[in-house]
Amino acid sequence: MKLTICTPTYNRAYCLDELYMSLCRQTCKNFEWIIVDDGSTDNTKQLVEGFNAESFPLKYIFKENGGKHTAVNKGIEAAEGEYFMIVDSDDILTEDAVDSIISGFIGIPESFAGISFNKSFKNGKLIGSTFAGEYVDCTSLERPKFNIYGDKAECFFTEILRKYPFPVFEGERFLGEAVVWNRIAASGHKIRWYNKAVYLCEYRSDGLSMNASGLKNFEGYTLSVKELLSYPQAALKEKIRNLGVYAYTARNKPATDSEIADFVHTSVVWVKLSRWLYTLKHKLSNSTREKELNIK
C-alpha cells in the first residue's frame, strides 16, 4: 500500500460523504482511508458504516475528543501506507490526486520529508501563493524564499511522521500543524513542492481555522511561537509576524510584556516592536477597507 489518507473528524456527518465520493472517483486506488472520529456525537459512525469501500481499504477509529492533532497521532499509528496525507472532513481531492501523489514521490531522496501540492478553493481559486515552474525543493521553514504562502497539501513519508508526533497539552483541543512541520524542517528534511492543486477546500464557520483560539490553547500556541523564534532557518519577517500576533493575543491573557518575553524566550524590545508592527498593519488595513467601502 502506497498512500494513507487520514481524515480526523468531529461531528461532520453532514459533509463527510462528499469526501468519500471524491475518493471513490480516484483514478488510482492504491491507498487506504483512515477516519479518526474525535468523539463525535452525531451519526458519523452510522454514516461510515454505510460507505461501500470495496475499491480501497477503510478504517474507522473512534476516540475520546482531544482535538485534531491527537486524532492525527492515532491515524499515524494505524497507517499502513508508505506515504501519509491529512485530508480534512469538509474538503475533497481532485480525481487524479492519488495518482499525482504517488507519481510525485518517484525519485524523491530518502532524506526528504515528503512532497506537497497546492490547495484551491472549490471554485478553482488558488489558496495562498506559489512560484513559477513545476516544483522547488526546500524545507517548510524556507517557504518564504520561494513565495510559498498559505495552506498546502503536504504528504509525508509515514516513518518521518512517526518520529515527530504532535505534542499534547492537557485540556487543549488545538495545535497547529506548523509545530511538527517546522520541527521536521529544522532537522534538515526538505519537501518537494509541486505547483499543482490536488486538494479542494471549503472553510466552514464551524471549522478549526475559524475557531482555533490562542487563548484557549495557550500552551500549544506558546510552544509553536517559541520554537519558530529559535530556528535560525526561519525568515526574520515570519518571526516578527508570528511574535506580533502572539504578543497582541497574550496581552488578553492578561500577561505583561516581560512575561510574554519569558514565555517565548525573547526580549521585551522584540515583543513591543512586533506587536506595534502588527497593530499598525491592521490599522492601515482597516483604514484601506473603510475607504474602499466609502468609494463604493
Image: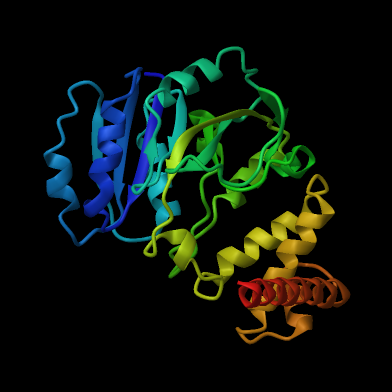
User: Is 284 placed left or right of 205 in the picture?
Assistant: right
Question: Foreground: 172 or 154?
Answer: 154
Q: Is residue 148 above or below residue 135?
A: below
Residue 115 shows in the view:
no
Return the residue found at the far top.
Answer: 107
Residue at left offset 71%, top offset 73%: 282
Question: In the image, residue 259 lies at what x, y percent?
Answer: 73, 81
- Considering the image in quadrants, where does the C terminus appear? bottom right
Question: In the image, residue 45 lies at what x, y percent?
Answer: 16, 49
Residue 191 shows in the view:
yes
Question: In the image, residue 139 lies at what x, y percent?
Answer: 71, 36
Q: Is residue 148 above or below residue 191?
A: below
User: Is 232 placed left or right of 140 in the picture?
Assistant: right
User: Is 127 placed left or right of 239 in the picture?
Assistant: left
Residue 117: image quadrant is: top right
Question: Foreground: 74 or 128?
Answer: 128
